Image (tube, rainbow, N blue to C red):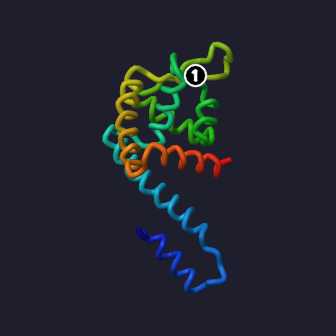
Amino acid sequence: MADPVDQILEQWARERPDLDASPMGIIGRIARLSRDHERAVGATLASHDLRADEFDVLATLRRSGSPFRLTPTQLGATTMVTSGTMTHRLDKLEQRGLISREPDPSDRRGLLITLTKRGRTLVDRAVVDHLDTEHALLAKLSPRERQQLAALLRRLGE
C-alpha cells in the first residue's frame, strides 16, 4: 500500500534517477510518525491538563520509585533539558501543587524535587491513557513486529 512518502520517492526517482533516495523513505516515515505521535499524545495529556514537558517531569519522578524524589540535575539529565528550562518547568509544576522543592540534607546548597500526592495521582491517571494512546498508534503491528521494530530503532540510536 502506497503512502505519501512513496510519491516523494517516485518523484525523486523520476527527476534524479542517479540518486539513491531510499533513506528519505525511512527518515520521512519516522518524521511523519513522530508528528502523529506528538499530536495524539498531546491530545491525551491535554485531557489531563498536562503538556508533554510537564508529563515528562512528573513521569520521571514517578518512575524513580518511592520517595519519588530527585535533584534538579538528575531530572535535567533524564529529561535532557538545560537547567534554565528545568527551573521554568519546576516553577509551573510547583505552582500547581504537583511537586514540592525541599532542601537536600546531603547538600546544603542543593534541592530535592518531590512528587506530591496530587502530582502522583495525576501522573498515575495520565500514564494509563498515555499508554492506551501509544498502544492504539501501534495497533497495526503484531507483538513480534513491535519487538522487531524496537530492536531496529534501538540499533539506529546506538
Name the residue: 60% across, 35% down: 78
Residue 132: horizontal and vertical position, in percent?
Answer: 36, 40
Name the residue: 57% across, 86% down: 15
**In the image, farthest residue toward the top:** 105
Badge 1 marks a residue whose secondary structure is strand
How packed is label 1: few (under 14 Cα within 10 Å), some, or many (20 or more)?
some
- According to the picture, the residue beneath numbered tag 1 turns out to be 112
**In the image, farthest residue toward the left:** 47
Q: Quadrant of residue 117?
A: top left
Residue 21: horizontal and vertical position, in percent?
Answer: 61, 73
Residue 119: horizontal and vertical position, in percent?
Answer: 41, 26
Q: Quadrant of residue 125?
A: top left
Q: Callout 1, which amino acid?
A: Leu
Q: Quadrant of residue 102?
A: top right
Quadrant of the snapshot with the N terminus: bottom left
Nearest to the observer: residue 123 or residue 92: 123
User: Number of callouts in the render?
Assistant: 1
In the rendered view, would you say 34 is above or below 128? below
Name the residue: 61% across, 26% down: 71
In the displayed structure image, the side of residue 81 where residue 33 appears, left or right: left
Name the residue: 64% across, 31% down: 73
Nearest to the observer: residue 128 or residue 149: 149
Residue 146: horizontal and vertical position, in percent?
Answer: 48, 46
